[in-house]
Image (tube, rainbow, N blue to C red):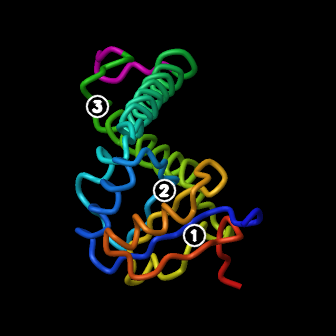
Amino acid sequence: MSNVKYILGHFEDPDEMMHGIDKLQENNIGIYDVYTPMPIHGIEEKLGYKRSRLPIAAFCFGITGTLTAISMIYYMLVYDWPMNIGGKPSLAMPDFVPITFELTILFAAYGMMFTFFYANHLFPGRAPRVMDLRATNDRFVIAIDAKTNPYPDKIENLLKEAGAVEVMHNERKYVSYE
């Protein structure tokens, strides 16, 4: 049992999996992660995950885009090449709202995309990190760290009582597609 890293409980029904999470938490057993083939509402609160900071990152990227647009407009039209067109001021901001808006959206969208890829390890060319391949298809998997939870028989019994179809002892951290 010393080389086992994770205990995986496989469920066919999301309600049974949620019941399994409740049973494990009642017995003070730490859950490493839960893998599902579809989003399940309310699972983040049940597992104690904090709210995503992606909106904060989007705001920062948007402000960066706004400041970049205003800086470029100021540099190009006021500092570098001021032109007098019909007696209008060099920096007529209402004329440049569309440009500023577009750069704000562009920076926010690309910044959020790269932040999401970085946070979830979804870089192009990298193999996905999957605990069990069936979790991407038709199974709901609860992964429990075997090193921090020293009672594998108790965990296995709790998972089976909650409705687990299969309980596996995983020796590797992630399964590769090769």
Q: Do residues under tags 2 and 1 come within 8 Å of each other at their CB atoms?
A: yes
Q: Which residues are magenta?
A: 82-89
- According to the picture, the residue beneath numbered tag 2 turns out to be 33
Q: Earlier in the sequence, mark 2 or mark 3?
A: 2
User: In terms of depth relative to the viewer, which is nearer, 54 or 172?
Assistant: 172
Q: Nearer the observer, disc 1 or disc 3? A: 1
Disc 2 residue type (three-letter): Asp
- According to the picture, the residue beneath numbered tag 1 turns out to be 131
User: In terms of depth relative to the viewer, which is nearer, 7 or 77?
Assistant: 7
- According to the picture, the residue beneath numbered tag 3 turns out to be 97
Q: Locate residue 102, reporting x and y percent.
A: 35, 42
Structural crowding at the residue carrying mark 1, measured as other residues with C-alpha within 10 Å and reported as few (<14), some (14–19) or many (≥20): many
Q: Locate residue 3, reporting x and y percent.
A: 76, 65
Instruction: Answer left or right for 4 relative to 32.
Output: right
Q: Give me the residue at 39% from left, 19% from top.
A: 84
Q: Locate residue 119, reporting x and y percent.
A: 55, 48
Q: Give me the residue at 30% from left, 47% from top.
A: 46
Q: Is residue 55 above or below residue 7?
A: above
Name the image quarter holding residue 50: top left
- Distance between mark 1 and mark 3 Cα atoms: 48 Å
